[in-house]
Image (cartoon, rainbow, N blue to C red):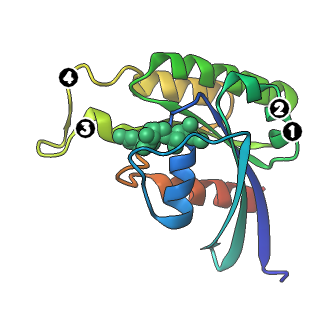
Amino acid sequence: ASNQTSIKLVLLGEAAVGKSSLVLRFVSNDFQENKEPTIGAAFLTQKCTVNDRTIKFEIWDTAGQERFANLAHLYYRNAQAALVVYDVTKPASFIKARHWMKELKEQSTKNITIALIGNKYDLIMDETSGEEIDGARKVSIEEGKQLADEEGAVFFETSAKTSYNVNEVFMNIAETILEK
Ligand code: GDP
Ligand code: MG
């Protein structure tokens, strides 16, 4: 229908940061504690409504393993949106995210909408006190924001486990693309 907009979205990031889990949370509102790794890439769709418009997300969830990394361009080449994901407790995954942000800037469609995502927020939060657990966070909010700013991306911290900010990421992407 003319009232429907499709958004091709790709997820990029190191293995085990929670890319597939974010998609599972968004598409099925579910979480699996020991999710089996993605092989190659998975394709899923999810519809939602933003400002009275039906948005159909067409999601390419890529595998983080090195042996698939050289295939990633096949998925982001035609993407309108990308989620670059790292794990807030894993500095190496943030370095990898920086690499993906640069690669997207150089190789993807000029006006691609990018969100930088620091996932596994639940691992650094003490639920009872509502405060961060000392030393659990390994990537600061400032580092995340700065990288996102440098590349013209939005920045979110999320938890696929508790669903914290997951819908917000997809809604923000949809709103941004509708405004373009
Ligand atoms: P991917 O390789 O990036 O797709 O990562 P997966 O989605 O397969 O997740 C890797 C592991 O991290 C799995 O055991 C998930 O259950 C776990 N995981 C994913 N997201 C979160 C999260 O937000 N919090 C916690 N505590 N674990 C998560
Ligand atoms: Mg996966």
Which one is in front, 44 or 100?
Answer: 44
Q: Earlier in the sequence, mark 4 or mark 2?
A: 2
CA distance for labels 4 and 1: 41 Å
Residue at horizontal 46%, vertical 30%?
87
CA distance for labels 3 and 2: 35 Å
Which quadrant would the C terminus be assigned to in this image? bottom right
CA distance for labels 3 and 4: 9 Å
Residue at mark 2: 71
Residue at horizontal 73%, vertical 62%?
178
Residue at mark 4: 134
Instruction: Specify whether 151 is left or right of 122.
Output: right
Q: Amino acid at mark 3?
A: Met
Q: Earlier in the sequence, mark 3 or mark 2?
A: 2
Residue at mark 1: 74
Q: Amino acid at mark 2?
A: Leu
Quadrant in which residue 34 is drawn: top left
